[in-house]
Amino acid sequence: MRGPESEEGSSETSLAPVSNPEQYIKHPLQNRWALWYFKNDKSKSWTENLRLISKFDTVEDFWALYNHIQQPSKLAYGCDYCLFKDGIKPMWEDERNKLGGRWLMTLSKQQRHNDLDRFWMETLLCLIGESFDEASDDICGAVVNVRPKGDKISIWTVNCQNREAIMTIGQHYKERLNVPLKAGIGYQSHDDTSSKSGSTTKNMYTV
Ligand code: MGP
């Protein structure tokens, strides 16, 4: 029943319920995310070079941030972006990363122009859209490294022993990016990556 104050002709129209709240309320994400930037300043330590840019937890705030910052292909060599769930630092040492690993995609130099920005945007959308079903809980974050030898994009997960979740994530991810079937991607534990002596780390899983 409408009260007398909302009857036609009432002067208190500002109290009338909003007919379409969708228009005014931002769309919440399942998680709050933090975007980090790494700038390679040789005079500083690795951790000092890592800076938090901003956090967001709505679709609208994600796009506002995304549209405001440079695309990875415009960054200088040695720079990274990292998108991680709020509370997880984008480093091997974090509690939620130390037993984990990453799906790693290494791009050729030509792919900087053709694929890098598109792949990174798709990676961000996979994360904030929780695209990996229940395995989304295993996601810690994603990183893009801009490097002269070839750029890298990786998705970090919580535990390198969680084979089922890791395979679900890898398969979905490969499909989303439309990576050619024979060009597989590999998963490596952070333990192996951080203690590697040569230039390659062995894959625990591949898709
Ligand atoms: P990188 O930036 O991940 O890859 O690691 P890049 O530059 O392509 O080098 P490559 O070794 O893979 O060919 C570069 C270096 O940054 C590492 O060797 C570490 O010294 C340091 N580093 C990278 N990460 C992700 C971490 C981290 O999580 N913690 C710490 N302490 N150092 C890191």
Image: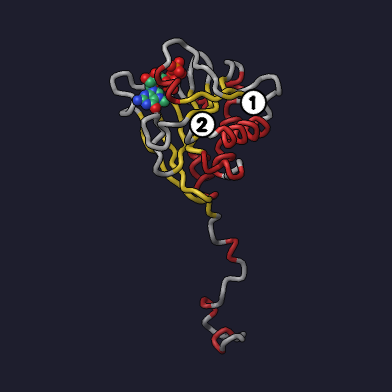
The residue shown at (48%, 18%) is: 147
Q: From the viewer's perspective, tell me whether residue 115 is left or right of residue 93.
A: right
Q: In which quarter of the image is residue 36?
A: top left
Q: Which of 76 and 129 is in front in this view?
A: 129
Locate residue 111, reporting x and y percent. 61, 20
Where residue 87 sits: x, y (%)?
39, 43
Whether the residue carrying mark 2 lies under 8 Å from ligand 1 is answered with no
Where residue 101 appears, as percent x and y from the top left, is: 48, 28
Disc 1 residue type (three-letter) = Val
**Quadrant, the N terminus:** bottom right
What residue is shown at x 56% (from left), y 89% (from top)?
A: 4
Residue at the farthest right position: 181
Of label 2 and label 1, which has the lower sequence position?
2
Q: Can residue 192 be seen in this view?
A: yes
Q: What is the quadrant of the C terminus in the image?
A: top right
Q: Which mark is residue 12?
A: none
Q: Give the quarter the ligand 1 occupies.
A: top left
Residue 172 falls in which quadrant of the image? Answer: top right
Q: Residues within 10 Å of mark 1 (few under 14, many from 20)?
A: some
- Which residue lies most toward the left here? 43
Where does label 2 land, which residue?
161
Q: Name the residue under label 1.
A: 207
Would you say residue 78 is visible in this rendering? Answer: no
Amino acid residing under circle 2: Gln
Report the side of 114 relative to 42 (left or right): right
Q: Residue at the spot x=36%, y=31% of the render? A: 93
